[in-house]
Amino acid sequence: MARQRVLITGISRFWGCELAMRLEADPAVEQIVGVDVREPSRDLARTDFVRADIRHSLIGKLVRALGIDTVVHTNLIVDPRRTTPRVAHETNVIGTMNLLAACSGADSPVRKLVVKSSTAIYGAEPDDPSFWTEDMKRRTPPRDAFSRDIVEVESYVRDFSLRQRDCTVTTLRFSNVLGPLLQTPFQALFSLPVVPSVLGFDPRLQFLHEEDAIEVLYRATVEDHPGVFNVTGPGIVILSQAIKLMGKLNAPVIPPYGGAIATAMLRRFGILDWPAHLLQLVQYGRVVDIAKLRDDFGYTPRFSSRETVEDFAAKSRVRGLLAEQTRYTYEKDLEEFLQRKGARGRGDVETVPVP
Amino acid sequence: MTAVNGHADLAVIDHVVGRPRARRPRQGDPRRRTPRPGDADAASLRARLNALQSATERELRRRGVVSLPAQVRRRVPALDRIPRARIPRLPDRERLQQELPMQLMGGLGRLAIGLRNLTGRDVLDLESLQDLMSIGVRAMELRRKHRRGVWDLDDFGFETDYADVWTPLARLAYRRYWRVDASGVRNVPRRGGALLVSNHAGVLPFDGAMIEVAILEDGRERHGRALIADWFFGMPILSWFLRRTGQTLGHPSDTHRLLTSGELVLVFPEGIKGTGKPWNERYRLRRFGRGGFVESAIRAGVPIVPISVVGSEEIYPMLANVPPLAKLTGFPYFPLTPTWPWLGVLGLIPLPSKWRIEFHPPIRTDELPPEAADDPSVVMRVADEVRDVIQEGLVRNLMKRRGAFRG
């Protein structure tokens, strides 16, 4: 197989960065192009960064000009706390639509598309099956904008895979990822000294270790695995167990009825910022089946759900030290110096017109 | 603690990093000897602690950690500021936890004998008391296990240890309250999956618990896994309690997963229509769903064991249903019984009817091809067969029973 030319969306964020770092170490990957509106959060060695918004049709030109054969879409906002709902909708739905439009057509060089999605697509309701498999659909339509967006995004991806028969499409539905450097709702929840929960509810949850998440993303990029896959650590953790493993106190302060009002109050006091679909998750839980990941994809996450929580608990105790370790201040200066001196012989993407 | 050896350093580091409570060192371990008043004066103790701290810092530096975080440094206690009070020696907490139930039981035993001598008959039933007390003991044991990080959860959220906490209470109801007569438990396979199908009655579904106890009482260490209405999973407390004790909801994929992993699955095909029956229609079976349970059994190739339960109808005689109140409270039905809601919470106490549970010979499905699951004629034929067996069993056992509450 010819050497891969990979385009990664959402390079400024954790997933894009981590994947790019993994791909940089792989000699079979010829070129890595990262696209985002902001600069990458880490310093990358041989990844070319293009400041562009996937909401514009520019991506199509970029893909064709560089002969990109693999597109990895990590730019889905699955944690809507950080942006406004409008921006999240624009990025998730319109962004994906544009990206797919850029990758489609008879003249498209794209042969592989990897989309990072979320198990939030299944929702969390009391009458859910105990284990979601990839072919199941939620019975009740999503009530909040974010869940609607995820459903819509995946429907676009499905349409794309039907239209572009020669393109391998992999959709990875990640569950709740936990990692010491990652900002996720559960990380925020478990970092509180007293963890609020819904009175009378103790849901079954699953967690995915960030290392496993990156490994699956990487394998989907360099190997061929068409289809939709649930990705999470094996086994389950119940919320009260997770709180005990974290060494925190469980405070069932959110009433079982009218929880949305209670969380709105917690948000007002700045204690907890919880979107509606997460309240549902903490009330009713969600567990997915990873048999397809194990059998078809050929990967079993190394960390079980419980081990993920335990590892996160251990690492949270030394979070201060970890954050110091990852802060390099001089490497970027060196990179810029080398770039100025023209030490890098690789084709520069500056040739592509970027308005 | 004359020399600061490597082990002491490790212990301190564990303390610093905040590892969960390490295992208790053996008694007589010189490292853990607590300072007593007069043992040494505070100044020398302080000096030794400081020596230990600097040794720790040296060790941490050697391992690449630059310096101790400030809050850890502060944590080294200034012992000379602790008042020299004589602390009474409390009994060891773990020993107390182990011995307290035995002490209590002994006391109750003496009380029971005393009362018998006094009144001339058994006033206290020791066996029941023991059952009730074992709930508390087991709950405490489980708490200790969880604190040690031992959780025996399966992927459905079922924790055998947790179910065992409540088994004594269910057994008490089984033996003493409803005086259940179980027959034919040998028809429940000792290993492998099986689908137990039962009639359903009694407003609040205690029949599931009684069937599960009947299997346990027969010496089969098997927990039945009941499939219950998804409505329960939206209810506070019940939502997690039912899952922790092994129940799950009646989704075909759940059923299939349980049956193929060799579990005993208990289903009530009548569903809520069965429990919400009015008093004058007692022991008349409702429609058996749409035969979904037969499909599941055929797909998994497991036998169906029909069960007739007599006595469950009388625990809450439902005189009337008030649909507007049901709608208001979100319950599937709102019953009026002779006691509910007139007596308030007391009205929730079920009546002590006499129960009989009969397990019928299994109906095999492994002879049918898996495609038969998609054939409505086969499915409905098997469903009707199961229904007839249960209805006949009900009639037979009602005839055997001398009265609804006697016997």
Image: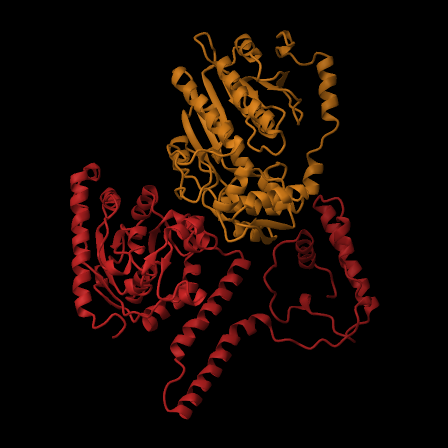
Chain colours: A orange, B red
**Number of labelled discs?**
0
Taking depth in this image into account, of A180 and A198 the one nearest to the observer is A198
Quarter of the figure with residue B307: bottom left
Direction from residue B404 to residue A352 in the image, left or right:
right
In this rendered view, identify the residue nearer to me: A193 or A344. A193
The residue depicted at 43 percent of the width and 88 percent of the height is B115
Question: Residue A81 at x, y = what percent?
Answer: 61, 34
Any part of residue B223 in sight:
no
Above or below for B404 versus B116: above
State the image coordinates of residue A97 (x, y, percent, origin top left).
50, 18
- Figure quadrant of residue B173: bottom left
Q: Does residue A336 sit above or below B157 in this rendering?
A: above
- Which quadrant is the N terminus of chain B positioned in? bottom right
Residue lying farthest right?
A: B43
Q: Which of B275 and A301 is in front in this view?
A: B275
* Above or below B109: residue A267: above
Residue pictured at 70% horizontal, 46% vertical? B63
Q: In which quarter of the image is residue A335?
A: top right
Judged left or right of residue B68, residue A272 is left
Residue placed at 48% from the left, 38% from the top? Answer: A232
Image quarter of the C terminus of chain B: bottom left
Q: Where is residue B112 in the image (x, y as percent from the top left)?
A: 43, 85
Q: Nearer the viewer, residue B244 or A326?
A: B244
Measuring from the top left, give residue A125's x and y in whole percent.
Answer: 45, 42
In the depicted structure, whether residue B174 falls above or below residue A215: below
Q: Is residue A13 visible?
A: yes
